[in-house]
Amino acid sequence: MLAHDLLGYKREPTLLFVTAPAPYRSTPSGLRSIPDHDKGTPVSVAAPIAPALSARAWALLLVLCGTIFLEGIDVAMLAVAVPSIRADLDLSTGTAAWVMSAYVLGYAGFTLLGGRAADLLGRRRMFLVWLTVFLLFSGLGGLATEGWMLIVARFVTGVAAAFMTPAAMSLITTSYEEGPQRNKALLVFAGTAAGGFSLGLVIGGLLTQLGWRWVFFAPVLLAAGILLAAVRTVPVEARPERTGGFDLPGAATAAGAMLLLAFGIVRLEHAAEGWALPAGAFAAGLLLAGLFVLIERRASAPLVRLAMLRRASMIRADLGALLFVGSFFGFQFVVTLYLQELRGWSSLQTALALVVMGADAVLAPTLTPRLVNRFGNARVVLGGFVLAIASYGLFLPIGLDWTYLAMFPTLILTGTAFALAYGPLSIAATDDVPDAEQGLAGGLLHTSTQFGSAVGISAVTAVYGAVSAGTDGSAAATLTAFRAALVVPVVMVVLGALITAYGLRTERRTAGPADGATAPVPAGEPRTTAGAGA
């Protein structure tokens, strides 16, 4: 069976110049095929015109989406349960904060390495191995009796996510043909991530009522189900071809630099304790980053081909993802504190109030693909940033007695903005990247989002702390500090909109005379999707 048949394409003839009827060869996933063609005699072959997915293709996509859902629900449930964990284990404020920060450090510190490992060691292998590690250490977290046990479990779980998530994303980008098929798969993937986080807030509130340990045991059950399905669904792939040895110095310096930079960002939340520690972490991280570049330039088989970092559209997409995700988590963090600390809402009430922000779980796979197909990635991303500016701006004058109805427009617009921006940014970050480097591209994207979430939360916390310091602690003073902190997400999405608008302007300059027209593609050259650059 041809791969296009497997994916459920409708087919009609189109004319390509090939030397002979192009034999389709299966990729390791078994879902995608590429014709071998060159200059020669014109023959009629079939081309896909509809983005329908077959049952088998949907099964693979749902399994891979299950991992990003698992990651989102795991983080959200723990965020809700931290106060209960702190009270039950008698943790200090600093230890409780590290229960959350350890996961961020593990994730942000190893995502780049995790993405590249998928390319070099096998996507299926990395996916299954690290999903198993995620399962085991989630369970160990539920058995913890001391704070340090939880911190270690969360750090290793974050490392597991750093290897597992880029592997899942690269399985998608190498299993579905670039264009409408891949775009649809990535948008479903993005929507599932947000749906997991939003649903996790509610489920976390419910499970915490039963006991905080269920917040750790529930992901174990979900991960076990995904693992069993993945063993049967994710096709066995050939061992990746490698030339030269593994770049251990590059791997060590990359991981060290990411860990130190992530640690410095996390410590910004505690700026009141002094700047020496975060400044030292940043300096050491930048030093290791510079050493990493030198190593990669001289390596015969570099971990990261530095030319990848000169892909302008990919870098703009990664920066856009950093700013957008950072603004989203920063905004959500402030709103959560406002509702719980200032308004006295319970964690479950807060979760139910914020669940409307998960609207993108529905919009991302339904509305966004149509907009991308019509307007291109860059315009849809820009629309998401502009909508986020309006959304956060509406919340700036928040008062002490706002009703939920007054907050609702901001919450639903924020979810819609996420649906417009995040999925297309994922597409732009992986478009036109060779299959052999799709794991790296996914690793760069997820590194950006993890750093973005850390920057967003740290920045709003620092602003809130600076404004509230020295006040009488009254409700009015606290509200003023919240309003100041809410400026941070606005600034981040404004910067993201400017970067996206610049990319759109550059794209227009390099476009052909007819906007949106498809120029003839020489035989043997890959086709690219319109509006890919963000």
Image (cartoon, rainbow, N blue to C red):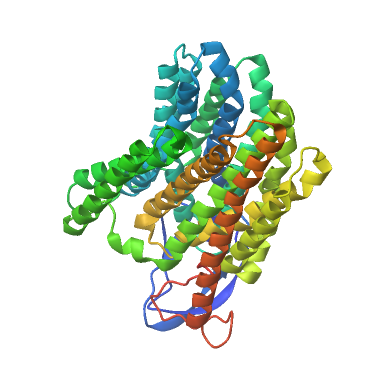
User: On the picture, is 164 further left or further right than 377?
Assistant: left
Examine the rendered structure and indicate whether residue 296 appears above or below residue 211: below
The residue that appears at 56% across and 12% down in the rendered structure is 88
Q: Looking at the image, which residue sits at the far bottom?
A: 513
Query: Residue 490 lies in what quarter of the image?
Result: bottom right
Examine the rendered structure and indicate whether residue 396 appears above or below residue 476: below
The residue that appears at 46% across and 34% down in the rendered structure is 272
Query: Residue 331 lies in what quarter of the image?
Result: top right
Q: Is residue 386 in view?
A: yes
Q: Residue 182, how many percent across, how many down?
A: 54, 58
Query: Who is closer to the viewer here, 298 or 468?
Result: 468
Q: Is residue 213 in view?
A: no
Query: Who is closer to the viewer here, 285 or 15?
Result: 285
Q: Residue 474, how many percent across, how many down?
A: 69, 31
Q: Residue 95, how many percent across, how many down?
A: 45, 22
Examine the rendered structure and indicate whether residue 319 appears above or below residue 237: below
User: On the picture, is 44 further left or further right than 249?
Assistant: right
The residue that appears at 34% across and 42% down in the rendered structure is 279
Examine the rendered structure and indicate whether residue 133 appears above or below residue 428: above
Query: Who is closer to the viewer here, 473 or 247?
Result: 473
Query: Residue 113 lies in what quarter of the image?
Result: top left
